[in-house]
């Protein structure tokens, strides 16, 4: 695995990555339910076998789940290489490390948003999201 350089994003830099980040997150949001379905199919197939072994259906589901897991891992690696942090398969949340008044914060973007318009403290999570304030984030004026 390639070493990732931790970077801090400005609003402009975070928004500039969104075309690529949006595509990767879209892929993740499509892949994850398919992976869950393959895992469930494997469990159902395997549960039908009373004495060891693996059914053909279970083998195929296991292989599909493994392939999808690899695809998901590749997407997560891409986001890590960009420098952002994927925070959830449900809403497609992505955090961009940033700074505000000398402390580390996250710029926060959700898959259905047109641009980065929120931020939160490092330990604040989605519940602590706040709109970008033009006083603290001058680029938010645009």
Image (cartoon, rainbow, N blue to C red):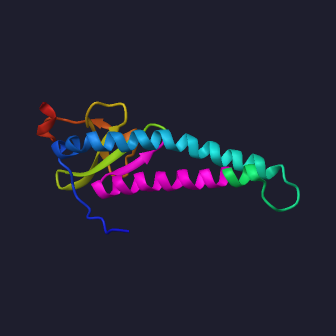
Left or right position of 132 against 58: left
What residue is drawn where x is 66% and y is 54%? 62
Task: Give the farthest residue toward the right.
Answer: 50
- The image quadrant of residue 28 is top left
- Residue 29 in the image: state x and y as whole percent: 46, 39
**Main SS of residues in magenta:** helix
How many labels were placed on the picture?
0
Task: Give the farthest residue toward the front.
Answer: 56
- Residue 135 in the image: state x and y as whole percent: 13, 37
What residue is drawn where x is 23% and y is 58%? 7
- Residue 47 in the image: state x and y as whole percent: 80, 51
Residue 92 vs residue 19, the one in the foreground? 19
Above or below: residue 46 compared with residue 28: below
> Which quarter shows the N terminus?
bottom left
What residue is drawn where x is 34% and y is 52%? 79
Residue 129 vs residue 16, the one in the foreground? 16
What residue is drawn where x is 26% and y is 64%? 5
Residue 130 vs residue 63, the one in the foreground? 63
> Which region of the structure is painted magenta?
61-89
- The image quadrant of residue 91 is top left
Left or right position of 60 against 115: right
- Residue 39 in the image: state x and y as whole percent: 65, 49
Please say whether residue 87 is one of the residues in the magenta stretch. Answer: yes
> Which quarter shows the C terminus?
top left
Above or below: residue 2 compared with residue 72: below
Residue 10 vs residue 103, the one in the foreground? 10
């Amino acid at each position: 695995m390639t070493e990732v350089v931790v970077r801090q994003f400005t609003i402009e830099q975070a928004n500039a990555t969104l075309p690529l980040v949006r595509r990767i997150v879209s892929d993740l949001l499509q892949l994850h339910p398919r992976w869950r379905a393959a895992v469930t199919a494997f469990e159902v197939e395997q549960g039908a076998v009373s004495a060891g072994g693996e059914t053909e259906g279970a083998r195929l589901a296991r292989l599909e789940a493994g392939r999808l897991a690899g695809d998901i891992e590749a997407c997560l690696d891409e986001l890590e290489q960009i420098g952002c942090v994927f925070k959830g398969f449900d809403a497609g949340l992505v955090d961009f490390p940033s700074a505000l008044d000398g402390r580390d914060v996250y710029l926060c973007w959700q898959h259905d948003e047109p641009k980065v318009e929120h931020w939160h403290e490092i330990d604040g999570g989605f519940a602590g999201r706040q709109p970008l304030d033009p006083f603290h984030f001058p680029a938010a004026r645009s």
